[in-house]
Amino acid sequence: MKRRSDAPPVSIVTPVWNAAGFIEETITSVMSQLGDEDEYIIVDDGSTDGTEEVLASLQKTYGFRLLKQANSGEVAAVNLGVDAACNDLVCVVNGDDPILPGLLRHMKETFRNEPELAAAYPDWLMIDEKGVILRTVRTIPYSYRTMLAEHFCIPGPGTFFRRSAFAGEPCRDPRAEGLSDFDCWLRLGRTGSSMRRVPEVLATWRSHPSGTTATMDGAKLARAKIELMTRFFARDDLPSGVRALEAQAFSAAYYHAALLGIRRSRVPSLRYAVASYRHKLVWPADVHPTQRRSLPHLLYAVTQPFSGWCHRLSDSFLPERFRRARVLSQTFGAQ
């Protein structure tokens, strides 16, 4: 048994596909924090933009483990890297999301002091493709009920987790495209696994036009939200307290699916909005302020593209909090 003063070793896994312009910054940010017993695994998912050559050069300098696969998607790359990890404590760092100084130190201290933890997550920065800070994201204290019942993926970039806590299940489910991290935390916490917030800004998430979030089809992502809930509640190992949240969880999932119509075309927002109210007409009063069901937002989504045209025309005359960029930032940080 480790002494309390011993920091647990960690494995960092980076899936990368066509990120030649970002990967060096990410690798440098990770390598500068690694200890002697830590490891860094990079999985190249069949890149075609010169990433392979950049990785080959950087591997000679840093000596990280480099795995390659034919292009199979981020989920497959993450699972390959996590399965290859030597340490139980793992963090997935995307190829375009450099970590900030102190992440590994803070997380090692957290898991050393609280060995029962299954996962821990920090606050983080949203940055643009040039690394300019767009906003600081202050996460909230962990609540499984909030995460499931409000469709609120609380852990974000920089989250560390114990592989052993998944009890043989894969870290990421390939069926949860676009939501595999949310699916991961829902499965991890369903039986009461302990997670907690580390209230320090220690990670980044890069918003740019070629990113996965920006390029995924909105209608597909909306369907994925409902399919995720359907798969989750089809499990036969859910505790009764979790299963009791089913109606509220589906209502929230349909609501957030409907909101995708604010910024993306071909989302059947009206159908999703009706389904949200059908599953739960009145939501609990203690829903987190950022997750509360908003009729104005639903009307905005349902009346697209007309509402978007009107908003653009009137944008310069509106108070700051009603301007298009501010409204869109309330729905998954849309740009």
Image (cartoon, helix red, strand yellow):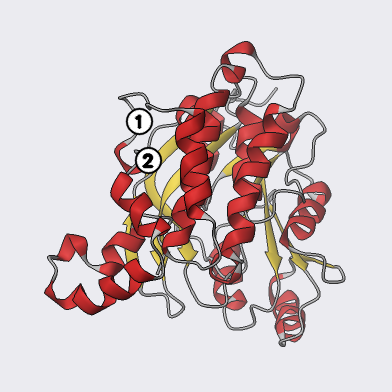
The disc at residue 291 is: 2
Quarter occupied by residue 18: bottom right
Q: Secondary structure at mark 1?
A: loop
Residue type, mark 2 in image: Gln
Viewer-closest of 145 and 297: 297
Q: Quadrant of the C terminus?
A: bottom left
Give left or right: position of 257 versus 263.
right
Quarter occupied by residue 267: bottom right
Q: Residue 1: x, y in percent?
A: 70, 22
Give the residue drawn at x 52%, y 46%. Answer: 272
The disc at residue 196 is: none
Give left or right: position of 206 versus 81.
left
Asked if 239 appears above or below 272 in the picture, the reply is: above
Q: Residue 208: x, y in percent?
A: 49, 75
Mark 2 Cα within 10 Å, few/some/many (few <14, many 20+)? some
Mark 1 Cα within 10 Å, few/some/many (few <14, many 20+)? few
**How much space separates mark 1 and mark 2, taking CA atoms?**
7 Å
Viewer-closest of 247 and 38: 247
Q: Residue 314: x, y in percent?
A: 19, 75
Give the residue drawn at x 65%, y 15%. Answer: 239
Asked if 304 appears above or below 226 in the picture, the reply is: below
Q: Which residue is mark 1?
A: 287
Residue type, mark 1 in image: Val
Viewer-closest of 18 and 198: 18
Q: Residue 44: x, y in percent?
A: 77, 70
Asked if 201 appears above or below 186 in the picture, the reply is: below
Q: Secondary structure at mark 2?
A: helix
Q: Is residue 150 visible?
A: no
Give left or right: position of 85 versus 317.
right
Give the residue drawn at x 56%, y 63%. Answer: 218
Query: Contact (CB < 8 A) between labels 1 and 2?
Result: yes
Q: Is residue 290 visible?
A: yes
